Amino acid sequence: MTDIATASAYVPEAGTITMFSTGWCGYCARLKQQLTKDGISYTDVNIEEVAGTAEIVESVNGGNQTVPTVIFPDGSSATNPSLAEVKARLAV
């Protein structure tokens, strides 16, 4: 029997986010740059390199592998969120 990862396995600690991305995604690179500039901690998970994570992204995006997909500390997710949305949802 194989363990299948779920989004709940990637729920981050308070004040940080988990971002599912790819190496070629321009929107991902932009959001990472903005988060770094604003001092917001994040864990980057490349869905092309980490087994099972593309399926997690699909599960929260209606079957689509859309990145960046972000998981927040409350377990909710957002697809291609703006920096302002991330900051608001983290209450930063």
Image (tube, helix red, strand yellow):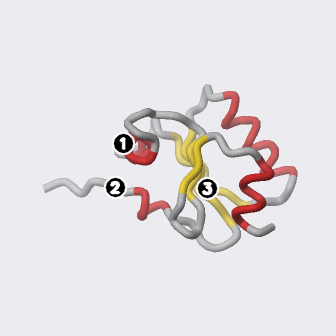
Mark 1 to mark 2 CA distance (whole Å): 8 Å
Q: What's the amino acid at mark 1?
A: Glu
Say what amino acid the circle numbered 2 marks: Ala
For marks 2 and 3, the one nearer the N-term is 2
Q: Residues within 10 Å of mark 1 (few under 14, many from 20)?
A: some
Q: Is residue 28 left or right of residue 35?
A: left
Categorize mark 2 by other alpha carbons within 10 Å: few (<14), some (14-19), many (20+). few
Indicate the secondary structure of the residue bearing disc 3: strand
Q: Which residue is mark 3?
A: 43
| Quadrant including the N terminus | bottom left
Q: Secondary structure at mark 2?
A: loop
On the image, the x and y values in percent for residue 21 come to 57, 39
Q: Quick one: which residue is furthest to the left in this view?
A: 1
The amino acid type found where label 3 is placed reads: Thr
Q: Is residue 19 or residue 60 the one in the foreground?
A: 60
Rounded to the nearest angstrom, the CA distance separating label 3 from label 1 is 18 Å
The residue lying at 67 percent from left, 64 percent from top is 16
Q: Position of residue 69 (x, y in %)?
A: 56, 45
Nearest to N terminus: mark 1 or mark 2: 2
The numbered mark at residue 55 is 1
- Residue 38 numbered tag: none
Q: Residue at x 74, y 45 (%)?
A: 82
- How much space separates mark 2 and mark 3, taking CA atoms? 16 Å
Q: In screen coordinates, is 90 left or right of 37? A: left
Whether residue 26 is situated above or below residue 80 in the rendered picture? above
Residue ID at (53%, 60%): 76
Q: Are discs 2 and 3 less than 8 Å apart at CB?
A: no
